[in-house]
Every structure is written in structure tokens, then in C-alpha cells.
């Protein structure tokens, strides 16, 4: 069960944006659907712990990651929330395998055997073995998406967040990768929240939908 | 002739290490944080680039001289003074080359995309780890170019060095000071040789720095 209530005010010189979004979902895959500028990505950042000053609460399976009334605000590194960025944000100076290992090998420590095995399984599952030593700049859009997803899953997150997972791709590719992504998410046993402006994404990828407009949930 | 060259290389190397550590740390901090006095501190850090080296040397004497704030403390606890020592020359060279590495490091950190750091945080990395595994490697080319410029600047340092470390042949006489001394003494041949040596080293360093910067694009 995902239980979210985010309140924050974003100020830029020419406008003020008030976000006050509350929703719950018990579905395995939930879509947060809204037009651009509706605040949906901001909600995602707040859940991941990347939005300083966010108030309200975020509970995943009853466990609070943020609860400003109780003074709880876990830093992003301690939230156990996997985030796939809109343009994937793969580390450009690391190979595919190093990207996948980043979250399971802490600085100054060796890779634990079970983590090594997990990375191997993920690479196999996402068809990345042949790309193990490739750098992100040499990958296609679809390959990048698979690496980003596998990297987020390598840390065994309690919640997976996808920010506009298909928007970095051109139209032709998008339809094909939508089906591929749906298949991958089906296999992944992690509760998922994805943000999109595209109704087709919702239909293909999610079981439950939450609509957001101008910083508020509208159903 | 070799003594001033080795001394210059030693002084410039240590000064670059010193300025490098301080400049990279400050560059990272200034690129990430905004606080009251941010632009004033930025200006202060760039000041050694525009102040006359003699003025800088005078400031350093006020600080590390026998009656200076730091100088008195060094003398009292370690029986050590930086005046007229090669360590003093290291300090002078580090101060004048600090703005070059600071500016390069700050720009390099500001150019690196903040999303990589955010992605690293969601993958469990603390701030120290973000620095070592993400920010520093991504900024490395820009920092390398800054270090090469710093080293070149440290090698050519004259004014502040002369004021702090003096002109003691074999002990504090670096190449640039030796050129000055040779000209003063009318030894044109020595002055020319020393000039050629320092010119060649500086050209090599500048080429290296621009190669590093070009490779980035």
C-alpha cells in the first residue's frame, strides 16, 4: 500500500506553484497521469526524497519515509526507493555493469557474493550481458531504459518510481518499448508508481490511475 | 643551474598539491551551496589573481611573519618560521595559483549534471560517496586543466616568493628569482638559459591544459 500526501510551494521569479497532492493505491502498478506542469514529477521527486522542504507524508507498506508531523524525513539514500529518471541519468563514466553495481557496492567495500549474483541475474533478465562493458553513450534508447531499470532494481527497492519512462524516445520506438516495458514490469515484483502524460502508457503499464492537475489530485 | 630548476619543480609541485586540495574542495562547496556572502567569498578567492604579487607577499608576511598571527604560533609551538625558507615559497606559490584551480574546479562541478548526483543518492550513496564516485570523476578533465595551469603559475611565481622566501641561492632561489638575480648581476648567458628552460616547461604545460579542455568537447 502506497499512501502519499505531499505539500510544497515552488517559487520562481515569475510564478508560484502550490502542490497539495494526496492519494493512496494498493495496486501493483499505479500511474500518476497529468499534463506537463501539473506537478506529477515533483510528487515523484518528493517520494524519492529529492525535494528539500517537502511536507506531508509518504508511507510504503505502512512504513513512513516522510512524516513532517512526526519529524520523519529520511534522506534519499535511506529510503529504499528506486527511481528511473526521465532521461535515465546513467553514469556516463561507468560501464553498464558498473552502473548496475553502483548501488550495491559501497565506497571502500567489496561486492558481496549475493549482490554479485543478483547483478548477474538482472543482466540476464534484462538482456544486458553482451553490453556489460559498454558505456551509456554507445547504447540505444531502449538499451538505456533497460540499464536504468536494472540499476534501480539492483538495490532491491521497496518501491519503484518511473518518471515519464518513454518520453525520451521517438514515436516509432515508443510503441515497441511500451510493450517491452510492460512485460518487464510484469516480471518485477516491486510496487511501481509511474508518472506520465500519455493515456496509452497508463493502459499498457498500470492497473490503477491517479489524475493530477495544477498540483491537485482530481481523481 | 640545475639547483634552481629542481627547487622550482619541488616548490611548484607541492604548491599545486596544496592549492589543488583547497581549490577542489572550495570549488565543490561553492558550486553546490548558496549562502549570504557567497559572492564576496568568491571574489576573495579570486583576489590573488588580480592583486599585485608584492601586495600578496606583504599580506603573507603580515600573517606568517614572526609577529604575524600564524607566524607567532608556528614559532612558539614548532620553533619554525616560513620566512626565508623554501616552505615559504611553497605557501606563496600555492596562494597565487589557488584562484586558477578553484575557478576551474568550480566551473567543472557546475557543469556536471545534478541528476547524476541525485540518481546516486537514490541508489544509497552518501554525500562523500557522491563526491568520490560521481562528481569528481565527471569534473576530472576540467580539474586536470586547472591543475596544469596552477602548476605553470606556481613555477613562474616571483613577487610574493621574493618577499616571503627571499633570494638565497641553493635554498630559496627558484628559477624566476634566479633569472632576476642573473640579470641584476649582468650574467646575460645564465639569464637566457634559465629563461629558455622556464619557457619550454610552461609551453608544455599550456599545451597539456588545452588538450585536456579540448578532449572534453
Image: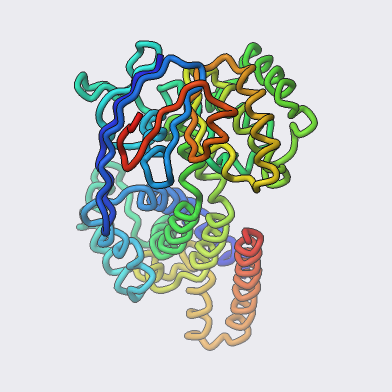
Q: From the viewer's perspective, is residue B2 above or below residue A99? A: below
Q: Is residue B32 left or right of residue A161?
A: left
Q: Is residue A218 left or right of residue B190?
A: left
Q: Is residue A139 left or right of residue B162?
A: right
Q: Quadrant of the N terminus of chain A?
A: top left
Spot occupied by residue B66 in the image (x, y as percentages of width and height):
24, 57
For residue A65, which quarter of the picture? top left
Q: Nearer the viewer, residue A152 or A21?
A: A21
Residue at the image point whose x is 52% and y is 39% from the top: A198
The answer, for residue B65, to whether it is visible in the render is: no
Q: From the viewer's perspective, is residue B6 above or below residue B134? A: below
Spot occupied by residue A101 in the image (x, y as percentages of width and height):
62, 26
Residue at the image point whose x is 43% and y is 44% from the top: A35
Spot occupied by residue B152 in the image (x, y as percentages of width and height):
54, 66
Residue at the image point whose x is 74% and y is 29% from the top: A128
Q: Quadrant of the C terminus of chain A?
A: top left
Q: In the rendered picture of this protein, how many numbered marks are placed on residues?
A: 0
The answer, for residue A77, to whether it is visible in the render is: yes
Q: From the viewer's perspective, is residue A14 above or below residue A142? A: below
Q: Residue furthest right?
A: A130
Q: Nearer the viewer, residue B30 or A51?
A: A51
For residue B199, which quarter of the picture? bottom right
Q: Nearer the viewer, residue A139 or B172?
A: A139
Spot occupied by residue B203 in the image (x, y as percentages of width and height):
63, 73
Please say which color scheme the image uses: rainbow
Residue at the image point whose x is 39% and y is 32% from the top: A211
Amino acid at each position: 500500500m502506497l499512501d502519499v500526501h505531499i505539500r510544497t510551494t515552488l517559487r520562481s521569479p515569475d510564478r508560484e506553484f502550490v502542490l497539495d497532492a494526496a492519494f493512496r493505491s494498493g495496486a501493483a502498478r499505479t500511474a500518476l497521469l497529468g499534463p506537463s506542469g501539473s506537478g506529477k514529477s515533483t510528487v515523484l521527486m518528493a517520494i524519492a526524497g529529492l525535494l528539500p522542504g517537502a511536507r506531508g507524508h509518504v508511507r510504503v507498506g505502512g512504513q513512513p519515509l516522510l512524516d513532517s508531523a512526526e519529524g520523519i524525513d529520511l534522506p534519499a539514500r535511506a529510503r529504499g526507493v528506486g527511481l528511473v529518471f526521465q532521461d535515465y541519468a546513467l553514469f556516463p563514466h561507468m560501464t553498464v555493469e558498473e552502473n548496475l553495481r553502483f548501488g550495491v557496492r559501497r565506497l571502500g567495500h567489496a561486492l558481496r557474493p549475493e549482490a554479485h549474483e543478483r547483478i548477474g541475474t538482472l543482466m540476464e533478465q534484462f538482456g544486458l550481458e553482451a553490453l556489460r562493458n559498454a558505456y551509456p553513450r554507445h547504447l540505444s534508447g531502449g538499451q538505456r531504459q533497460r540499464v536504468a531499470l536494472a540499476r534501480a532494481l539492483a538495490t532491491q527497492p521497496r518501491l519503484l518510481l518511473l518518471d515519464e519512462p518513454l518520453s525520451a524516445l521517438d514515436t516509432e520506438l515508443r510503441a515497441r518499448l511500451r510493450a517491452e516495458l510492460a512485460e518487464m514490469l510484469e516480471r518485477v515484483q516491486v510496487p511501481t508508481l509511474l508518472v506520465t502524460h500519455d493515456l496509452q502508457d497508463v493502459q499498457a503499464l498500470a492497473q490503477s490511475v491517479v489524475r493530477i492537475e495544477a498540483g491537485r489530485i482530481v481523481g | 643551474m640545475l639547483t634552481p630548476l629542481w627547487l622550482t619543480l619541488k616548490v611548484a609541485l607541492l604548491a599545486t598539491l596544496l592549492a589543488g586540495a583547497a581549490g577542489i574542495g572550495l570549488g565543490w562547496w561553492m558550486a553546490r551551496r548558496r549562502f549570504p556572502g557567497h559572492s564576496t567569498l568568491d571574489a576573495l578567492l579570486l583576489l590573488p589573481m588580480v592583486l599585485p604579487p608584492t601586495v600578496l607577499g606583504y599580506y603573507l608576511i603580515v600573517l606568517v611573519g614572526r609577529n604575524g598571527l600564524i607566524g607567532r604560533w608556528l614559532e612558539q609551538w614548532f620553533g619554525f618560521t616560513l620566512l626565508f625558507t623554501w616552505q615559504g615559497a611553497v605557501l606563496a606559490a600555492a596562494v597565487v595559483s589557488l584562484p586558477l584551480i578553484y575557478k576551474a574546479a568550480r566551473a567543472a562541478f557546475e557543469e556536471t549534471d545534478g541528476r547524476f548526483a541525485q540518481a546516486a543518492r537514490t541508489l544509497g550513496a552518501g554525500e562523500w560517496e557522491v563526491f568520490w564516485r560521481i562528481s569528481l570523476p565527471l569534473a576530472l578533465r576540467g580539474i586536470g586543466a586547472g591543475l596544469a595551469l596552477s602548476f605553470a603559475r606556481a613555477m613562474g611565481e616571483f613577487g610574493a616568493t621574493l618577499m616571503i622566501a627571499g633570494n638565497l641561492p641553493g635554498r630559496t632561489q627558484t628559477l624566476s628569482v634566479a633569472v632576476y638575480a642573473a640579470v641584476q648581476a649582468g650574467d646575460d648567458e645564465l639569464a637566457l638559459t634559465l629563461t629558455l628552460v622556464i619557457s619550454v616547461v610552461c609551453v608544455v604545460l599550456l599545451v597539456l591544459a588545452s588538450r585536456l579542455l579540448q578532449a572534453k568537447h
